[in-house]
Amino acid sequence: MMAQNLPLPPDIQAISGERPLALFLDFDGTLIDIAPTPDGITVPPDLAARLTSLAEQLEGRLALVSGRAIPDLQDHLGIVGIACAGSHGSDCRAADGTPIGDEPDALSDEVLHEVGAFAAANGFALEDKPHGTALHYRANPELEEQGLAFAHALALQHGLAVKRGKRVIELVAQGADKAGAVRNLMQFAPFAGAFPVFVGDDITDEDGMRAAVEMGGFGIAVGDRPSENAVYALANPAAVQQWLHL
Ligand SMILES: O=P(O)(O)OC[C@H]1O[C@H](O[C@H]2O[C@H](CO)[C@@H](O)[C@H](O)[C@H]2O)[C@H](O)[C@@H](O)[C@@H]1O
């Protein structure tokens, strides 16, 4: 199913034929199908090579923008020589690995301890991340309300932000989001001055799409979640890969 009956995007070659295209791609649910657990995803073995080749066609103006930390992306994909923004925009790096922008501190030990204890006591699967922590409840969807109440109370107490995703609630530093990642990358070559397009499936991707729109581009929603900022839609990761000619 597709988001809000939005039309299919124009062919990528038609877009990039008109002006230099800067492409920002979410990972889970956009390039790769959602799996029961974070480590259970199936990543085609040649995906990294295909992304690298796409980046070359775009003269380097391709970035992965993920809620996952960059080392986690690399564990699944291998080292890809393209720009990456990990941990919901907390950690932005150019294609050669050079950091872009400030990297926020990790969460305090006190917060990590509280979240870990809550997860263990209530049936959430905990994902520790370098710039945050995630409570997964895909195996127990009824835990959502309880998880949100806990996360919002803890965020208020410690000045953190809550991110919601597909059967996941995350705590991260204030100010980290995918809009910031897009804006950061668009300040520098080879992205600066290009036409930004953000492709994503989840709530956190709305920030990235909004930033693309602000800079004259557009968003493409993936899947059936209604999108506030997308003007085009693709049905699933297979359709994204096809659209990208991967
Ligand atoms: O911004 P993304 O690249 O889409 O990353 C968002 C989160 O993705 C991962 O969790 C989600 O995918 C898992 C694997 O399909 C799934 O089991 C889980 O229910 C989803 O929430 C990842 O584990 C998170 O760290 C990312 O923030």
Image: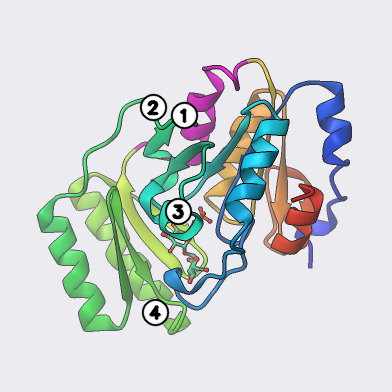
- Residue located beneath label 2 in the image: 98
| Residue interval drawn in magenta | 175-192
Tell me the CA gap for discs 4 and 1.
38 Å
Between label 2 and label 4, give the one nearer the viewer.
2
Amino acid tagged 3? Leu
Front-lying residue, 68 or 136:
68
Amino acid tagged 4? Leu
Tell me the CA gap for discs 2 and 4.
39 Å
Label 1 environment density (alpha carbons within 10 Å; few <14, some 14–19, many ≥20): some
Between label 4 and label 1, give the one nearer the viewer.
1
Front-lying residue, 58 or 113:
58
User: Cβ–Cβ below 8 Å for labels 2 and 1?
Assistant: yes
x and y percent of residue 218 in the render?
A: 73, 35
> At numbered mark 3, what does the secondary structure look like: helix, strand or loop?
helix
- Disc on res. 94: 1
Label 2 environment density (alpha carbons within 10 Å; few <14, some 14–19, many ≥20): few
Respond yes or no on whether mark 3 lies under 8 Å from ligand 1: yes
x and y percent of residue 191 in the render?
A: 60, 22
Between label 3 and label 4, give the one nearer the viewer.
3
- Residue located beneath label 3 in the image: 73
**Quadrant of the drawing holding the N terminus:** bottom right
Amino acid tagged 2? Thr
N-terminal of the pair, mark 1 or mark 3, is 3
- Residue located beneath label 4 in the image: 143
Tell me the CA gap for discs 2 and 3.
17 Å
